[in-house]
Image (spheres, rainbow, N blue to C red):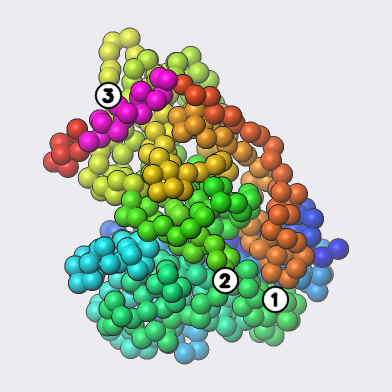
Amino acid sequence: MTYTLGIDIGTYETKGVLVDQTGVVHAQAARGHKMLVPKPGWAEHRPEQDWWDDFVLICKTLLNESGVEASHIKAVACSAIGPCMLPVDASGNPLMNAVLYGVDGRAEAEVRELTARIGEEIIIARCGNALTSQSVGPKILWLKRQRPEIYSRTSHILSSTSFIVMRLTGEVVIDHYTAANFSPLYDVEAQSWVDDLVDDILPLEKLPRLMWSDEIAGHITKEAAQMTGLAFGTPVTVGTIDAAAEALSVGTNKSGDMMLMYGSTIFIILKAHSKVTDPRIWYAPWLFEGEHASMAGLATSGTLTHWFRDQIARDQSVQDAFPTLAEEATKSPPGANGLLMLPYFSGERTPLHDVNAKGAMFGFNLTHTREDIYRALIEGIAHGTRHVTDTFAELDQAPKRFLAVGGGTKNALWLQATSDITGIDQIVCEKTTGASYGDAFLAAMAVGLVERADIAQWNPVVKTITARPNAVYDKAHGLFRRLYEQTKDIAAELT
């Protein structure tokens, strides 16, 4: 029997799996860590402790618990949160804590400056996305200006996955999907680093070598073998960002496949048939050469259900609250007896990109119940999802099916409302291991143990949610869109 190993580094936890060539999981392990917030709006990890030490411990745990000989592990893959910004010296040592992805907003001034200097239309056309707190380029410029002593000693700027791959193999590489978040230093058409948009951020030779996620970045060094317990010479893939690995784990392979992640927020990856750059959505080359991905995200989803539980369902225990609320909400009909909710409790990401958007519940009368309110909340998130899928359709990228992942897949009401409101069927796969399972599959692909289509056997479909057209929802969606437009100016003035 042969095996592959996949490890994913998340914001608060690192998870790993050891999987055989048929997709059976032989061992799992996890280790928690903290996100540091040294100042309001900042978010950091300690790369040595939170990334590398976690990776080493997970490797040893998987080997010990499975009893598998390291020599039987044919490939290793890693994914991680991203894009992150980590400067390292010539020996690969971190020069500071890693600056995390979009949750870190320290470079807001640089985002505004670079957007003004280059022009947003040009940035979107060349880089695929407008500059935001998710963009690495402005954070490098922040480093240059605010930490010049570190900038001057920087040999390379790495992402989280790049750092692990470098520690394992000595190679400094990055996948194209992650690199697309290094705007304005990455050109999505040329699929290369560029400095013609702005030439004062960083010399391009200090950026990692570009590769595709399923390529072999290098092999386990003797030093890495001694530290992790992995066998010297084991192939290591280039890897990617965690959400992309999770999309792979459930079979997001065909054009029109859309991973819908029901987490604290909604995150979406659509396997697109062509490159589309539009200010309302995000774009990146997909994990494999010649393929494309469009992305989107709502600013809230699971955070709203938790807010409702904590503020309006205090009579329910934490363990029983969500099943009870979902059961209660089935007593409310589609449309929640005329209640309509805007889910913008933390502003909104795609397609509105409105940080001033506010949450609202509209249509109350004295007959409404908690059941109606909770159903309206679930439906409001689903209407936000339809706003995204309608935007994709306007761009000739209409999703054909949803591949649902995340904690929200346990909520049957939420799944059904989302399919009914969007008009798109959903599937839920057997294994909910997530990104680390996608990493293990990517590793198996890289060394020829499996083909991409084999994910259907590795992780078969166990549930299908069929969309049920409903005129009530179609009317409500039009009202949902109008309600935002007619209240956004008021929302912007509220503090």
Residue lying at the far right of the rendered structure: 1
Is 325 left, or right, of 460 in this rendering?
left
- Mark 1–mark 2 Cα distance, whole angstroms, equals 15 Å
- Which span of residues is magenta-colored? 471-485
Question: Relative to the observer, which residue lies in front, 15 or 386?
Answer: 386
Residue at the disc numbered 3:
362
Q: How crowded is mark 3: few (under 14 residues within 10 Å), some or many (20 or more)?
A: some
Q: From the viewer's perspective, is residue 91 above or below residue 54?
A: below
Residue at the disc numbered 2:
212
Which disc number belongs to residue 92?
Answer: none
Question: Relative to the observer, which residue lies in front, 89 or 455?
Answer: 455
Q: How crowded is mark 1: few (under 14 residues within 10 Å), some or many (20 or more)?
A: many
1 or 3: tag closer to the N-terminus? 1
Residue at the disc numbered 1:
235
Write the residue at 57% across / 37% down.
Answer: 426
Based on the picture, tell me whether residue 345 belongs to the magenta stretch.
no
Q: Do the residues labelled 3 and 2 touch (CB within 8 Å)?
A: no
1 or 2: tag closer to the N-terminus? 2
